[in-house]
Image: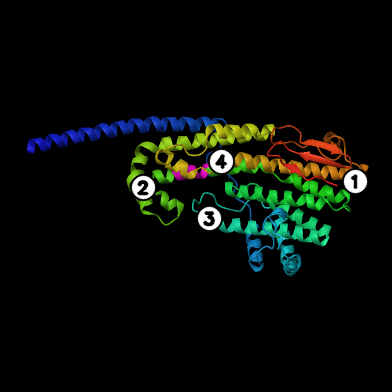
Amino acid sequence: MKRVLLRVAVVLALVAVCIAGILAVIRGRSDARLERYKRDLRTKGEKLSVAELRPTGSSNSMIPNLRPLLQQMSRPPIIGGRAQMRPTNDWSQMRQLLDTNAHRLAEVRKAVALKPADLGINWSNWNTSLGADFITVRDAAHWLNSAVLIELERGRRLEALTNLLALLDLAHCHEKEGSFMFQMIRSAMSGLAFESTPDLLQNPRWQDADLARLQASWEEVSLSGPLEFSLQMERAVVLNYFQMIRRGTNIVDIIGMTPSLQDEMFDHLFLPVWRISLSAKDELFYLQRMQLVLDSLRTANRTSSGAEFARTLAKTNMSSPRLAAFRFPVASAGTPNFSSLPSRWIRRETERQLAIAGIGLERYRLRHGKYPEKLEELVPDILGRVPVDFGDGKPLRYKRVGEKYELWSVWENLRWPRTE
């Protein structure tokens, strides 16, 4: 009996040694592939660490100035643009609310006029929470947009312009912020400004200098470059997570949430296996997916066309493949949801071009008493170049119709309101 047990023990030991050897070989090959891929990326100029992306540290943020002001103000009277307003909106009540908070709103405009480059976050601290900052900037945007619409309803065009310029200043802030989610918020603020700009232009008393200020503010807003930078920073932070988890940190500790029984089992039963044999494959899978997104975005920005960007991500199926959460747990948890990214990026960039074109057309009418026959007539006296349709990289579609005009994009039938 003792001999049988001894033989079984020897066999099990040999099996364990074989398995360990196989895993060591797999890990060695996977580690080598990962390091080769990283070297190739760095040779191409990619920055893979937080230190490489922020060598000089962060700037000061306007958030400490905004937060106490907004805490003293009530909820913004209008959430969203004019399209989201309900018939039950009480304009007299909203005017009173705006007047009550006028002095605080003036301080908000001063704060956003500083246009800080980022939130002043130390991205080497992996446990940074941005939720409160998101809420502060969101509320400031809704307050400024509310002021635009309320002042327009009052017929106070210059006050409306002041608040719209402040909203665009807010969209111009934090262009070097490394949070992908924060760049999506900047994109949404640009969308708010786009909805209010046509309403502002309906007033017939504008002077060319007023519209030139508005045009310059729209031209200053940058979306593509900051979005690319945020994806690079997200990648650098997630690569830090890979290193931390390899060294023994559990995923639930990084997420910072109360772990469920499933989370505990995953951390204590699966992660040890992941650390031995799967971590390099997981990291390589993550890097390849992120590089695909970055390369597609760069091509779309260079060509001013997002159509190929959308097709590439659709063909690649950026949603997690079957069993990806098991095979590539960190990559699956660390990759943002890119399903709507191409459509949202194309829309916001095209809206910006439509706004610039719409303002340019009004400036042309002020100078010549009529709208041009073609958009090319705006260049170079009013615009530096013909506004581009990011749906296909061609000029925006334009048609003069008597005393009016039509201006539109091929992307999702996006149109600039017909102007009288």
**Residue type, label 1:** Leu
> Please, is residue 159 above or below residue 254 in the view?
below
Cα–Cα span, label 3 and label 2: 24 Å
Q: Earlier in the sequence, mark 4 or mark 1?
A: 4
The residue depicted at 83 percent of the width and 47 percent of the height is 212
Q: Which residue is mark 1?
A: 366
Return the x and y of residue 229 as percentages of the image width and height. Answer: 60, 42
What's the mark number on residue 241? none
Q: Are marks 4 and 3 in contact (CB under 8 Å)?
A: no
Q: Badge 3, how many Cα within 10 Å: few under 14, some, many 20+?
A: few
Residue mark closest to the camera, 3 vs 2: 2
Look at the numbered disc 3 and give the secondary structure of its residue: loop
Return the x and y of residue 325 as percentages of the image width and height. Answer: 42, 41
**Residue type, label 4:** Ser
Residue mark closest to the camera, 4 vs 3: 4
Q: Which residue is mark 2?
A: 266
Q: Are marks 3 and 2 in contact (CB under 8 Å)?
A: no
Return the x and y of residue 149 as percentages of the image width and height. Answer: 76, 58
Magenta stretch bounds: 235-242
Residue mark closest to the camera, 1 vs 3: 1
- Depth check: give the residue in front, 322 or 215: 322
Res. 45 in view: no
Looking at the image, the residue that sits furthest to the left is: 1
Q: Earlier in the sequence, mark 1 or mark 2?
A: 2
- Depth check: give the residue in front, 339 or 15: 339
